[in-house]
Image: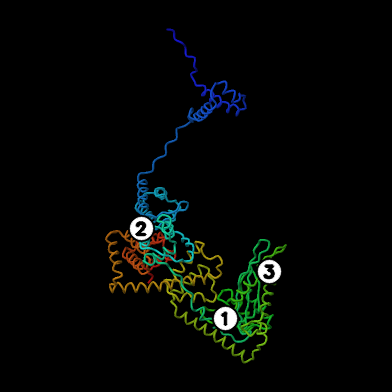
Amino acid sequence: MTAIADSSPAVAPSVIAGLLLAARDHLLGLGLHSDDTESIIEKAGAARSSAYEAKARILAALPSIVRPVGRPRAPASAPPPKADALTREALCFVMDHPGCVCGRDRRVYADSFRRFVLDLHQKHRELEVEELARAVDVPLDTLHDWLRAPAPPQPEPPESDPTAWKTSNLHIETVLSEWNRWQGGFVPFCEHAREHLRLPYGRTAIAAILEAHGVRLRKKREGRSPDETALRGAFQTFFPGAQWVGDGTPLVVHIFGQAFTFNLELNVDAHTGAFTGASIRDEEDSAALLQAIADGKAATGAAPQAELVDNRPSNLTPEVREALAAEGTLLIPATRARPQNKEHVEGAFGLFQQMAPPLVLDGDTEREVARELLRLVVTTWARTLNHRPRADRGGKSRVELYGEDKPTPERVQQARAELEERLRRQEAARRTLQARQDPLVRQTLAAAFARLAIVDPDGHLLDAIARYPLDPVVDGIAIFEGKRAAGSLPRDLDCPGRYLLGIVRNLAQEREAEQICEAMLRARLEAQDALLAPLVERQRSAERQHADAPGLLACLIDHALDTERHIDRLFWLDAAGDLIRRQPASDHAALCRLGFRRIHAATRAPYSDRLKACRFLAHKAVPLD
């Protein structure tokens, strides 16, 4: 039997057509001639769809035909076994603590997760920070912030008005049970309760449930001080021109999109409320005060018997004293919580802000034109108010009140004598205060004023701060220097010494409250108070579980920051401070830093509470007395 040769092609027509189509793309790219696609498919005898499928497979296989020069790329190395174990440990922690990590685009970490990561860093010192960040899936910058003192948290948005709510026992038990297991913040918990637990409650209702059962206490704002009402109308006046009240305020003029800031220095007569003189300058300084007094003298015909100013250093310079002494005018600085405050001029500034239109000028002008425009506006405003009838003065205007009451020489002499006596009592009280103050405190403040370049020509600010104990003074100076180094001091701070005074005063009040609470705590412990018995038992349990000082210190601070009750927090911080003091002196600094880092890791607590906890721990661990 004769064999018949197989005449079928060795390669399928669709493959040949695909190869020619692929070659055609490259030929056209190089500018060479090629048949059209219809001719290629027809001559090859292939179907259109099969030819294009073959073309796609051929183009995809081309890069693999010739291997690039050089060694092939090494496969990515697997993470080290220790980092893999840390990743698994972090995953287990997140699964056991629901809510400790929330958010997708912007994650929010609970205090328990931060402490867990800090503990991992403490245990595995051989790992680099970058390796630990990759293992626990925390951004490197975030982990660096945790190892330092983090920034203050943003305040929660204001809640809507409270509404009436009704709950069942089952819903209340669900909220309480989930809150005990929750490791995150309050706002994510409310979202979890609504979305996952399907509880029809808002933040206000959930907060009320938790507060009613004593597991989360809401902080209430302090009320208005009764001094504001009690001191109203207590300013002593004599007659027109006996005493002027002066002060300055910044005003902004907008011209062609540019903002020019000037200082308005204003003098107001204390008896009539008339605006006697004003000055427009670039800044509030001694020249502005003298110019406003001169303007008032030109308007009224005489200088006042006394000028009341605030304790700004520029108002108490020797130049101001000499100029006023030449006019026979007493310079009286205002003091806090005294009748001689500056309510007259402050009220005038408030009226100006209400009545003055926006100071915006469109035109081809310069800075001096802006100054003159402001001068015209202030002059028009002052003249208008000076001639407006006052209902509280029998329908008479300020001009009428200022001009009709002519004091007799006897009244002038009596007012002058009383004003001089007031100034003498102030100076005597100041000298007595200086004699009673601690020399060490004054020396510390003097050195700080020189180092911080705080201007205090008459020593009033130093006298006011030196009346506080050494502890709040040292802490206040440290806080001021830290804020200045961090760039967080107010931008419009015109008197650094007064700002330092406020810091020291707040610290002294806070320290006094802490000492009172600490004394109450000691008294209760001595009396074996039943309410504190569980705390004592938990402290003993912590001491049995942690043999090393760092571990016990971290446990005590965690208990302190986890509680909502102030006296409980003082109990744990007091125990932490005693623990540090019992250790060798060479370990105090390292333990304090560990305690501070642990406190600042508890971002669930407000930033101010964490600062108070750090100061309390520092006072207990390293006392100055």
Q: Mark 2 packing: few (<14 Cα in 10 Å), some, or many (20+)? A: few
Q: Is 148 rendered above or below residue 77?
A: below
The colour style of the image is: rainbow
The percent coordinates of residue 573 (x first, y second) are 35, 66
Looking at the picture, which amino acid does disc 1 mark?
Ile
Lateral position of residue 583 relative to residue 184, left or right? left
Badge 1: few (under 14), some or many (20 or more) residues near its Cα, within 10 Å? Answer: many
From the image, tell me which residue sits under label 2: 181
Pick whichever, 559 or 52, lies toward us. 52
Residue 185, compared with residue 272, is above or below; it is: above
Task: Return the disc, 2 or 3, that comes first in the chain's sequence.
Answer: 2
Residue wearing tag 1: 332
Q: Residue 96: percent from the left, percent from the top?
A: 35, 53
Quadrant housing residue 470: bottom left
Q: Which label belongs to residue 581?
A: none
Residue 103 seen from this side = yes
Q: Earlier in the sequence, mark 1 or mark 2?
A: 2
Q: Is 215 displayed left or right of 236 in the figure?
A: left
Badge 2 amino acid: Arg
Mark seen at residue 371: 3
Residue 506: where, in percent of width, then height? 46, 72
